[in-house]
Amino acid sequence: MPYRNPILRGTYPDPSICRVGEDYYLVTSSFCYFPGVPIFHSRDLVHWQQIGHCLTRPSQLNLKGIASALGIFAPTLRYHDGRFYMVTTLVAGGGHFYVWTDDPAGEWSDPVWLEQDGIDPSLFFEDDGRVYLTSTGEPSGIYQAEIDLKTGKPLSEKRLIWRGMGGRYPEGPHLYKVGSTYYLMISEGGTEYAHRVTMARADSVWGEFEPCPFNPIFTHQNLPHHPFQATGHADLVQDHTGRWWMVCLAIRPNQLYFPAHHLGRETILVPVAWNADGWLIVNEGKPAEIENPIDPLPVHHWPEQPDRDDFETSSLNLYWNFIRTPESPFWSISERPGWLRLVGQPATLNDIAAPAFVGRRQQYFASTIRALIDFDPQQEGQEAGLTLFQNEDHHYEIGIHREMDERVVFVRQRIGSLEAIVARASLPMGTIILTIETTLSEYTFGYQLTDGTSHVLATGRTRYLTSEIAGGFTGVFVGMYATGHGTVSTTPADFDWFEIQPHGD
Ligand code: 6LW
């Protein structure tokens, strides 16, 4: 059976992977979203089931005041002596820390803060029990210190171990010991179109690191028409049959205007192997592909995720996210059983705050998104609906609010410093279904009434929600939201169900 990339669609960048027996675990970055650092489980490296998040409590992750392009960057997941460790950086909020657990689907510890600067921390457990923390640092390069794992305190000076091959932003380091050789794998060139993976090796954990003679070992930087671009930020795993694999991030740009991507940086799986000289060959020296000839391991499917969430569960499904750490109990699935209730907060989607928002990643270019909403705003300023959210300055809404005596459904577009309601229609009483058709190039916003009629209100281009336009490191999220515009709303917005039906990729 061929396997398909990406193995995780939508904004799941900076993957890090580890193996425990015949089980595989993977984490990715989460930036301004809460809970932080989603964790997945697989038995075949291709099909992944989310089992939780590493950072679920405000004591572990306080994103207050942190811009959406910052927050939780590149985590590393490692398993050592029966325990899982996840080390990451809270950018603009305290730097590196790690959390640990014996049950990756359960609760993780409170943070143990680390003193090293930079981003992209990684842990290396030496056979003699010593633990090394590797990260970026200044002047530009990869730095390492031995640390006391219990306290997080350094046990050695931080030392520059490699500058990389001269590409900008040497980052994403991971250190591996294969036999008696230490391999340092990093990325360079920045996370955009010049992204590349380079490697060096040494006989000692401190170096001197000798660069691979054919660096970069992996890049798509000179393949402008390849469906995957920006491949990099990689981690390695040896499977339980002895073969080696790389997970890394890649983007799937929309080639319609100029390369630009709006689904974020996704996770792909690439076969790798060591050559006779002990260097790593990525996919036999070829680019990574969507279709790959063979499954790495016998296929292990997880239960299918239904397209629709009816909110009949006792807790929110794991694919839902908040923007930043919630500061008030703005959501409930118990107050009106079978419905998700959102209470509009003073914050709007334009604020670096914690608005009433429950959203998930847009994972498919072409899809139909629908949600049934029961919302009868009593005052101007009370608003609720669906949003396509890239960041505070770039998002589209189809919402319901009150204008004088009318209940109105409208489409708003916020593109940088421009904000406008681009279409509106007055609504009869009753529930309505809000709809968004997504294609590679366009979002079409509409609604369906209880009488069965469907109406299109407006379209918006995907282009203005791409990372190239909107900036940052994340892709589009689609969410249910509510706001009271400066005050807590007295009327809740209730969602009976929310569904995404994908149409192909
Ligand atoms: C991450 C860096 C990178 O820390 O982007 O692609 C940064 N690589 O290594 C944010 O994801």
Image (cartoon, rainbow, N blue to C red):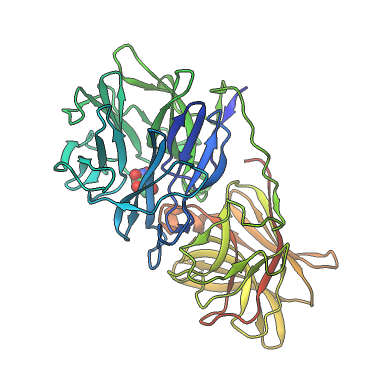
Residue 146 falls left or right of residue 326: left
Q: Is residue 354 above or below residue 117?
A: below
Q: Position of residue 238 (x, y in %)?
A: 42, 24
Q: Residue at x 64, y 36 (%)?
A: 302
**Residue 187 visible to an observer of this rendering:** no
**Location of residue 424 (image quadrant):** bottom right
> In which quadrant will I find the C terminus?
top right
Residue 450 falls left or right of residue 433: right
**Location of residue 298 (image quadrant):** top right
**Residue 495 visible to an observer of this rendering:** yes
Q: Position of residue 247 (x, y in %)?
A: 44, 33
Question: In this view of the protein, which residue sits in the foreground, 40 or 415?
Answer: 40
Q: Is residue 93 above or below residue 285?
A: below
Q: Residue at x 26, y 48 (%)?
A: 151
Residue 263 falls left or right of residue 457: left
Q: Position of residue 177 (x, y in %)?
A: 30, 25
Q: Total of numbered circles in the picture?
A: 0
Q: Is residue 204 above or below residue 231?
A: above
Question: In this view of the protein, which residue sits in the foreground, 316 or 283?
Answer: 316
Q: Residue at x 65, y 79 (%)?
A: 491
Q: Is residue 275 above or below residue 35?
A: above
Q: Position of residue 329 (x, y in %)?
A: 55, 70
**Location of residue 388 (image quadrant):** bottom right
> In which quadrant will I find the N terminus?
top right
Q: Residue furthest top?
A: 276
Question: In this view of the protein, which residue sits in the foreground, 453 or 346?
Answer: 346
Q: Residue furthest bottom?
A: 404
Q: Residue furthest left?
A: 157
